[in-house]
């Protein structure tokens, strides 16, 4: 199997010591940053100013996952704040293609996130324009949920669609990922693994990252 990237999700970090928490996951490949607005998902997290603070405190690329309605209004602000990868939800906008173009004009990596009930076929027309596809493997809104088993089949279908088009975006999975579940998605074609509670809930974060990486590449 190819190399995978691990993206620790700071949603599960201790917010009172965020700088130290970021330093503790420096063996990861991306910092995953969950923005929740209390509308698109029934929970509220953090926003633009915290992205800016995180960007200043890590050398890793910042992977912003917008779980917000009207992403069209906010994407530029998150790019200004330092997002290197920007994922918005397919379900939240009528203008996915326009948003992808905007993200690219600003020099960032563009990604579209899919809720569990959204078929991968929705991305068929714009797949070739994407740097990454984010497949939700739980319903967005909360950390610590269980992996939805049918996601493996969905990822396999997405990988097949990419092969048919001769394109190779990163395939990121988000929700319920641990050393126990990661092989179910990497064997289906995923190569970027978001991990919140399985990393920040572990006493030794570097060991947890290493364990997920090895289980995913086995
Ligand atoms: C859920 C978020 C996830 C969350 C994953 O809506 O998008 O990024 O942090 O948490 P775990 O890894 O605990 O399932
Ligand atoms: Zn996320």
Image: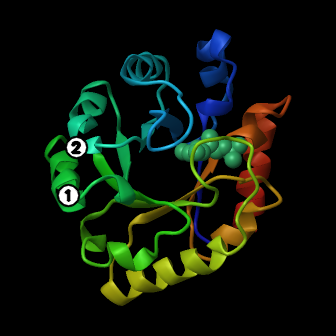
Camera-side residue of 60 and 73: 73
Q: Residue at x 46, y 34 (%)?
A: 35
Position of the C terminus by quadrant:
bottom right
Label at residue 95: 1
SS class of the residue under badge 1?
loop
Left or right: residue 16 compared with residue 30: right
Residues at discs 2 and 1 in contact (Cβ within 8 Å)? yes
Camera-side residue of 122 and 16: 122
Left or right: residue 102 compared with residue 7: left
Which residue position holds label 2? 72
> On screen, 24 above or below 125?
above
Residue 26 screen position, x and y as percent: 61, 30
Residue 15 screen position, x and y as percent: 63, 16
Q: Residues within 10 Å of mark 1 (few under 14, many from 20)?
A: few
Question: Quadrant holding ligand 1?
Answer: top right
Snapshot quadrant of residue 203: top right
Q: Residue at x 47, y 86 (%)?
A: 160
Question: Is residue 208 in view from this perspective?
Answer: yes
Question: Is residue 26 in view from this perspective?
Answer: no
Label at residue 85: none
> On screen, 133 above or below 210?
below
Q: Residues within 10 Å of mark 2 (few under 14, many from 20)?
A: some
């Amino acid at each position: 199997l190819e190399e995978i990237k691990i993206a620790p999700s700071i949603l599960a970090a201790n917010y009172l010591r965020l700088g130290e928490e970021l330093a503790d996951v420096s063996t990861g490949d991306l910092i995953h940053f969950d923005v929740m607005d209390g509308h698109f998902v029934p929970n509220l997290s953090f926003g633009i100013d915290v992205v800016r603070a995180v960007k200043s405190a890590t050398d890793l690329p910042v992977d912003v996952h917008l779980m917000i309605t009207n992403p069209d209004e906010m994407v530029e602000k998150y790019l200004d704040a330092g997002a290197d990868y920007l994922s918005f939800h397919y379900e939240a906008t009528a203008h996915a293609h326009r948003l992808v173009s905007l993200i690219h004009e600003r020099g960032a990596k563009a990604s579209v996130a899919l809720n569990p009930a959204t078929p991968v076929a929705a991305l068929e027309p714009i797949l070739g324009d994407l740097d990454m596809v984010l497949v939700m493997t739980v319903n967005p809104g909360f950390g610590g949920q269980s992996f939805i088993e049918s996601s493996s089949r969905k990822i396999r279908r997405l990988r097949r669609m990419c092969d048919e088009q001769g394109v190779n975006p990163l395939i990121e999975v988000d929700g319920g990922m641990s050393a126990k579940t990661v092989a179910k998605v990497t064997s289906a074609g995923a190569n970027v693994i978001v991990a919140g509670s399985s990393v920040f809930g572990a006493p030794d974060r570097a060991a947890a990252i290493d364990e997920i990486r090895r289980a995913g590449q086995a």
